[in-house]
Image (cartoon, rainbow, N blue to C red):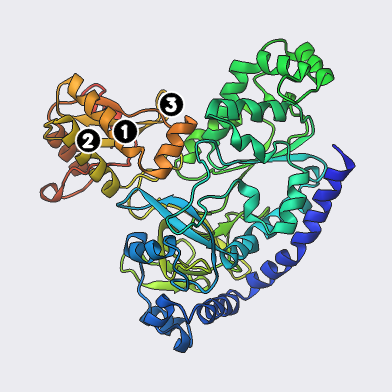
Amino acid sequence: MSGLAMLANVLTAAGAAPARARFAAALRDPAGTQRALLMRTLRANADTAYGRLHGFASIRDEREYAARVPLVAFDQLDGWMSRVAAGESNVLTRDAVRFMEPTGGSSGFLKLIPYTAALQSEFSAAVMPWLFDLLTRRPALVRGRAYWAITPPGRRPAQTAGGIPVGMQDDADYFPAPLRALLRRGLAVPSSVAAAPDIATCRYLTLLALLATPDLALLSVWSPSFLTLLVDTLDEQFDALLYDLERGTMSVARPDLARQLRMRFGRRAPQDLGLVWERLALISCWTEGHAARALQGVRERFPNVEIQGKGLLATEGVVSIPMFGADAPVAALTSHYLEFLDPSDGRAFPAHALDVGGTYEVALTTGGGLYRYRLRDLVRVEGMLHRAPLLSFQGRADRASDIAGEKLTAALVERALDAATRSTRTTAPFAMLAPSWMPSPHYRLYVEAPEWDAQRLADALDHELHAAHHYQLCRSLGQLGPVRGVSVLGGNSTYEQVCAERGQRAGAIKPPALDAAPGWECVFECAPEQVLR
C-alpha cells in the first residue's frame, strides 16, 4: 500500500486514542459516566418543546427522569418527528438536525430518525474506541486498506418536506470529520460507487476496486449475506472483472495484477478467497441472531480470516461495541444514556445494576432527541468487563423477524397482508408469513387457498412490504428473495396443534400474520410425522 495510506491509518489510531481513554475510564465508573451523560443531555435540551413538556430543567437525577419521562416507541413520537421533518426547530433538540436517516417502525413503514451534531458525536464516542482497538490489537490492519460498507444505489438524494437531507453515504459517516478524511485515505473502494445506477453495477465496481487492492486487510459490512452476495457476483463475473482490470475499461487499470490473478486462478475465482487477498486479516459483520445462519457461507469462502462480530448498533443509537479479549460486546457507556427493561415487569435498570445471565430490553436517551426510547432489542448480560456489562444480542422484544436486517414485525405484516388481501380480493381463513432459509433466505406465505391464489397473494404481499424501508433494501440487495406462496389445508388447526405441543394453552392460541420461528416448512410441507418442536 502507499505510505500515505499507512500514515493515515497510524494517524487515525492516534486520533481515536482520547476516545479510547475515556471509554476505558467509563468501564470502571459506569454509574458516574452514565449519570453525567444523562444530565448533560437534559440540560442541553431543556428549552425544547419536548423538554418543557416533561420538565427537563428541574430533573435532578435518574429516578426523577424515569418518573417524569415516559418510555416510548417510535410510533408514539410520530407527531414530534413530523414537526422535525417539517423543519420546525427546538422540537426535540436545541441542536439543528443535519439529516434524517430512514429506519423501520413497528406498525408503519418508513420512519426517519433525526441526526444532530450531538448524536453523531455520541456514535463517534463508541466507534472510535472500537477502531482504536482494531488498529492497535491487530497491527496487520494498519498495513492494509479497508472496505467499509457503502450505501447502495437506489437511495437518491432526497429531502423532507422541511428541506432536511435524508440519509448518510457510508459507514465512515459515523466518525468525526477529521478522522473521516483520514479513513478515506485508506479505503479500497471509493464512496462514489454509491452513484452507480443499480445494484448489479455497484457490486461489479466494488469488486473491480477490491481486486485492484491486493493489500486489502479489513472488510466491514453489516449482514454477512451482503458479503456472500458480493462473492456470488465475483464467481459469476471473475473473467470479465479480470478483463476490465487488465484493460482499464472502467477507470481501474492494473494489467500486471490482472495477469497474475489469471495465471494463478484461470477464469474462476478460488474457493478460498484468502488466496486472492492474502493480507486480509479481519471481517467485521453481524454474527448473532439470524445472521449466524448466513455466517457459514462467509467462513467457507474465507476459512483462514478472523471474523469479529459487530456490537449492537441501530439507526437510533449504539448499545454495545466489540473489544478483543471480551466474551461479548461491551455496553457503549460513553455514547447514550442506557436503560435496561426487565421483560417480565418492565422495571428499568441502569447499566451498572444488571444481573449476569439476565435478559433485558434496551431503552436509549440520545442527543438526537430520543428520550427513554424502546429499541425493542433484547440483550443478555454475559459477564462484566471491570464494572461494565458485556451484552449479547438475543433477538427482538416485539417478536420481529430479521433474517438479513429487514425487521418485519407482526403489526407491519398484518397491515401489508390486509392491503394485499383487498387488492387481490383473496379470501383465506388462514394466512401466515414465516422465514425460510432454503434454498436461500426468503419468506413463505402459508395460505389456506388454491395454489394459484396463494402465490398471487404472496406477490401482492411482497409488493406491499416494499414500502418498508429495511425490507425494500434487503430485497434490492438480493439478501432476501421474493415471498413464496404455499397452499395449505387446515392451517388454523395445524398451527394450534404445534403451539399446543410447545406448551401454549390451546384456547388462547391465535394465528399471527407473522411467526418468526424457524422450521415451519416441516410443519406445512414435510411428511406428517415431521413436526416442529
Label 2 sits on residue: 420
Question: Is 98 drawn above or below residue 473 in the view shown?
Answer: below
Q: Which mark is residue 440?
A: 3
Percent across and percent down for residue 384 are 58, 64
Left-right relation of 434 to 501: right
Percent across and percent down for residue 493 are 12, 35
Left-right relation of 133 to 528: right
Percent across and percent down for residue 375 are 42, 59
Q: Amino acid at mark 3?
A: Ser
Percent across and percent down for residue 79 are 33, 65
Q: Which mark is residue 463?
A: 1
Question: Is 365 drawn above or below residue 289 in the view shown?
Answer: below
Image quadrant where residue 1 sits: top right
- Disc with the residue nearer the chain's start (2 vs 1): 2
Front: mark 3 or 1: 1
Left-right relation of 300 to 394: right
Q: CA distance from mark 3 to mark 2?
A: 24 Å
Q: Can the viewer see residue 504?
A: yes
* Element marked by disc 2: helix
Seen at 36% across and 37% down, the residue is 466
* Element marked by disc 3: loop
Left-right relation of 445 to 350: left
Q: Nearer the viewer, residue 1 or 432?
A: 1
Question: Given contact means CB atoms under 8 Å apart, are the residues at marks 3 and 2 in contact?
Answer: no
